Amino acid sequence: MKFILVFLCAVRCFAVEQEQILGSWLRQQTNVQTWAADFVQTRTLKALAQPLVSAGRVWFAAPQNFRWELGTNQTIAIRSNETMMVIYPRLKRAEKYDFAAAGPSEWKDTLSLLQSGFPRSRAEIDQQFKILSLTETNNLYELALQPRSVGARKMMPQINVFISTNSNLAGTELVFVDGSTMRNDFQIVRTNTMVEGKFDLTIPADYKLVEPLKSARK
């Protein structure tokens, strides 16, 4: 009986600590209007013995606009309100995703999770995710999240968010259904700085434009 009481007390104490960690992080998030950082992206694929490592930059503006630049003219992903563009400058190709016009689809649900590192409240987390665990390792808290959308889980069953001990976003990791992962570790973080012009969706006239969500709907 004594062991059971000690165990239950430990569980309750850990649950309280989890809520404190999440609460501190979310309170800090409410003060973030714009956010920018450099990052190192590490992709692990079963087909490759060594991971692929690339550098990049990211900008975010609350509540949902973002711009990711990977490598030098390698890939650019921009979300502006209800539209996202993925641009491949070397191929002179761009993919347009109109979330407002698209019907339900696995792609739409999955792509909407890309700003998962920037929730504004616990209710926002609970709306999109089930919290699987919150653990501490290497001076970082790792928050494991499972998408509530069945369609999104078919492509991306888990997202891990890494939070520093001072409640800042330190990294994200996308876990795909085939077991591959894509982790972004953030560096040189700038909060509430100018991001004007970063979410412009204009592409050069000679780029080929495709709209995958329209194709998925047919």
Image: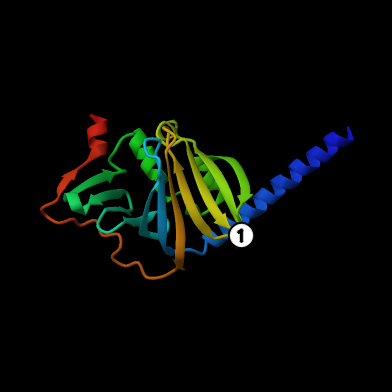
Instruction: Choose top left, top right, bottom left or bottom right for residue 49.
Output: top left
Quadrant holding the C terminus: top left
Label total for image: 1
Q: Residue furthest top?
A: 218
Q: Amino acid at mark 1?
A: Thr
Q: Residue furthest bottom?
A: 194
Compared across the picture, whether 12 is left or right of 134 comes to right
Quadrant holding the N terminus: top right
Residue at the image position 49 percent from the left and 54 percent from the top:
171
- SS category of the residue bearing label 1: loop
Residue at the image position 44 percent from the left and 33 percent from the top:
153
Question: By what rule are the colours in the image chosen?
Answer: rainbow
Residue at the image position 75 percent from the left and 43 percent from the top:
12
Q: Is residue 102 above or below residue 170?
A: above
Q: Position of residue 122 (x, y in %)?
A: 57, 49
- Identify the residue under disc 1: 165
Compared across the picture, whether 218 is left or right of 37 comes to left
Q: Residue furthest front?
A: 49
Residue at the image position 23 percent from the left and 50 percent from the top:
88
Q: Position of residue 86 (x, y in %)?
A: 27, 49
Q: Position of residue 148 (x, y in %)?
A: 49, 36
Instruction: Choose top left, top right, bottom left or bottom right for residue 109.
Output: top left
3, 21: nearer the viewer: 3
Compared across the picture, whether 195 is left or right of 89 comes to right
Q: Residues within 10 Å of mark 1 (few under 14, many from 20)?
A: some
